Image: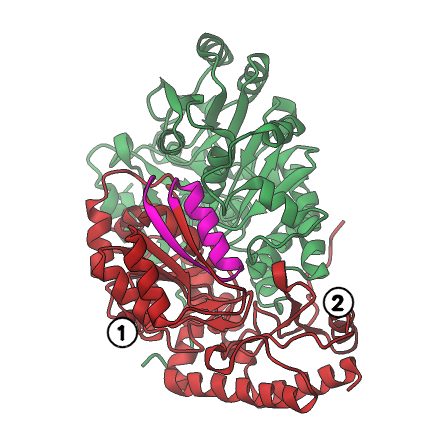
Chain colours: A red, B green
């Protein structure tokens, strides 16, 4: 019998996400729910769309939220824009770009990959040359690779994709709200994210934005996507003027996201980016002081997620266990080719503070015996 | 600038869902989140699985939660069990069975339909005869049809499906937690639901259960489902012993569902069913007193969702507007062939109380001018 009320332990969430949640977001989640066709719900949804456009750096009218986690956002992008047989070019330099390739394959794409070691990124010239050579129908890449901590510049990819008439898909799960995303400046057609990283909200929704060019492509598409749940044309009919019933939107999560975005607007997006950059740099400097090196070259590091190398002779799992046991601090290890080689440590959203960075550095110094 | 904290209006949710949420569930949602690989998360998940088994009437080891709404549960069932070319028999008597057919079609099924007018159900003999004649690979039906208020007995369908070697899929979105679901007694292989109906939780998750026979079928399946996000084999690897990362589960919604299920356990499932039945009958009796008839025959009515006919000469939209304007009461109208012909009025979950039924009856009486 489970007669007690649920009480969760307090963790200090410095992993690759979920990140700490702003108290106002928790408060918003216990506001009373309304129906999924209630005018208040659509007001909240409009407000979310407006606030998301700022974070994405876009004027895209089509800016909405998928009722699933960031992975559902990825699948929505692939399911709607990758038709069976479509040549899909993947910049493959980490776990999440591998997953893009896996999803595209399941949707019947002809996948072509540009491989790089995990932790590296593509120069503008490399990106341009790959796309011009392959002339794909779809180009997909990860702006902020959560498995490696590397930032991929989107501008050459977006511009060259348009040059060859391809739709570009960008994963912004770990950048949105913590770093410039530049959807319009880079000419990206489809960008998606999750709520549990630099937005400072629990996981559960996937914000997505589509360029007018992408919307036009979608309207011309002859085949139906295999996924009904993630069919963006049906979602447009629901969220936009017709408000035609599609699914019962997870209203409490919409409240949470609205609140997280309002908190961002109050802070100011550029001030928030600066805060992320400053605390990331403070953390890296502190790591250098205790002799810990970074995986990613300085120019390509995310401000949201840090990937220090596991020092020689150190067992990364033991360090993580120690941090959790002594301080309730969650950080993550690497996986795939980076298993045992890096830590993945988030300084993002509500969690990106100078105080947290100092706490993390002290705890790491102790756990590493430095 | 959106500087204020979100405040939602209080609605009396007597539509077809979402239904009113128990206060303990709101409290649980503001508990601090933990990571998606935290042992505490898997404990919560195990507890949810145990409590769900009781509600489903099953001993299925494979009982878990999809990170999307009830519609994602439907898509998970179809994506995993309907292979391209599979003959899929649909009991087509409402909106949600139409949607099952639509999803199966998108997954490449050969769909065969047994049509009945919306509001009617299938006798054991009819069900048996259809399945024996078609000998399909998959049989799908809706136990509690939210568009019509009709209850479909699952026993003959489940038994006959096994007789011909078919996988049976049952939609329990509007029955789970408010009426007997009988997964094991009826021999059903796959059943899914949503959280926002008789479970008394906000929308956002889709509980699903699969029989050992269904799991074995899944393990033998040679092709990958097109959907990666809803791939049950990958989800098994995440939720079960390996805890291999799949997606970042919406932890706050898991807290909410755990709490809603704990509330059900405290009330006692049979007591809860009785409460739903009693309040449904009280409502129907009260409707009869003001001369309002029901769409569905007495033996086939849901206890969770009532579909009174719109009386001659009454504009259903005006009635709904009046209820919202005067009392903040949300009820719904019919759609498809039932547009303008029925109201859809939920008495479910935390909302199924004698007090609410009396309030609803008084408000309806006034709005109908009876």
Vertical side of A98 occupied by B113: above or below? above
Image quadrant assignment for residue B209: top right
Q: Chain of mark 1?
A: A
Q: Is residue A65 left or right of residue B56?
A: left
Question: In the displayed structure, would residue B88 be above or below residue B173?
Answer: above
User: Label 1, on which residue?
Assistant: A185
The residue tagged 2 is A317
For the image shown, how many numbered marks are present on the structure?
Answer: 2
B217 vs A113, nearest the viewer: A113
What is the crowding at mark 2: few (fewer than 14 residues within 10 Å), some, or many (at least 20)?
few
Residue B113 as seen in the image, left or right of residue B353? left
Which image quadrant for residue A147? bottom right
Report the magenta residues as a range.
A84-110
The N terminus of chain B appears in which quarter of the rendering?
bottom left
Q: At numbered mark 1, what does the secondary structure look like: helix, strand or loop? A: helix
Left or right position of B234 against A292: left
Q: Residues within 10 Å of mark 1 (few under 14, many from 20)?
A: few
Q: Secondary structure at mark 2?
A: helix
Q: Chain of mark 2?
A: A
User: Do the residues under discs 2 and 1 have CB atoms within 8 angstroms?
Assistant: no
**x, y percent for residue A36:** 37, 53
Identity of the residue drawn at 67% across and 83% down: A292
Above or below residue A347? Residue B289 is: above
- Which numbered disc, 2 or 1, marks the residue that appears first in the sequence? 1
Magenta region includes residue B12: no
Q: Using the numbered discs, state the Cα–Cα distance from disc 2 to disc 1 in whole angstroms.
A: 41 Å
Q: Residue at x 72, y 55 (%)?
A: B43
On whether residue A97 falls in the magenta region, the answer is yes
């Amino acid at each position: 019998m489970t007669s007690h009320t649920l009480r969760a332990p307090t963790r200090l969430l410095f992993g690759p996400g979920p990140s700490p949640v702003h108290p106002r977001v928790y408060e918003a989640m216990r506001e009373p729910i309304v129906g999924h066709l209630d005018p208040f719900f659509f007001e909240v949804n409009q407000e979310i769309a407006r606030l998301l456009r700022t974070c994405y750096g876009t004027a895209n009218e089509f800016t909405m939220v998928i009722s699933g986690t960031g992975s559902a956002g990825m699948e929505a992008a692939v399911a709607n824009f990758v038709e069976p047989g479509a040549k899909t070019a993947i910049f493959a330099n980490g776990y999440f770009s591998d997953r893009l390739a896996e999803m595209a394959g399941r949707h019947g794409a002809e996948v072509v990959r540009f491989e790089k070691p995990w932790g590296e990124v593509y120069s503008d010239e490399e990106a341009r040359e790959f796309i011009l050579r392959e002339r794909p129908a779809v180009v997909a890449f990860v702006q902020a690779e959560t498995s490696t901590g590397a930032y991929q510049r989107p501008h050459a990819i977006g511009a060259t994709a348009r040059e060859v008439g391809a739709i570009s898909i960008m994963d912004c799960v770990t950048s949105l709200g913590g770093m410039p995303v530049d959807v319009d400046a880079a000419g990206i057609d489809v960008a998606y994210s999750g709520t549990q990283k630099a937005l400072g909200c629990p996981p559960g929704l996937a914000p997505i934005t589509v360029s007018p060019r992408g919307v036009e492509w979608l309207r011309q598409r002859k085949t139906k996507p295999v996924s009904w749940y993630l069919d963006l044309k049906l979602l447009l009919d629901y969220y936009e003027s017709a408000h035609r019933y599609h699914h019962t939107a997870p209203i409490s999560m919409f409240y949470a996201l609205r609140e997280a975005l309002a908190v961002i607007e109050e802070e100011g997006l550029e001030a928030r980016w600066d805060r992320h950059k400053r605390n990331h740099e403070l953390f890296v400097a502190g790591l250098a002081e205790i002799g810990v090196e970074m995986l990613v070259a300085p120019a390509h590091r995310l401000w949201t997620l840090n990937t220090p190398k596991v020092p020689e002779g150190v067992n990364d799992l033991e360090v993580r266990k120690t941090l959790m046991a002594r301080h309730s601090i969650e950080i993550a290890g690497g996986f795939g080719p980076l298993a045992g080689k890096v830590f993945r440590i988030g300084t993002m959203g509500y969690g990106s503070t100078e105080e947290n960075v100092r706490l993390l550095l002290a705890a790491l110094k102790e756990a590493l015996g430095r």
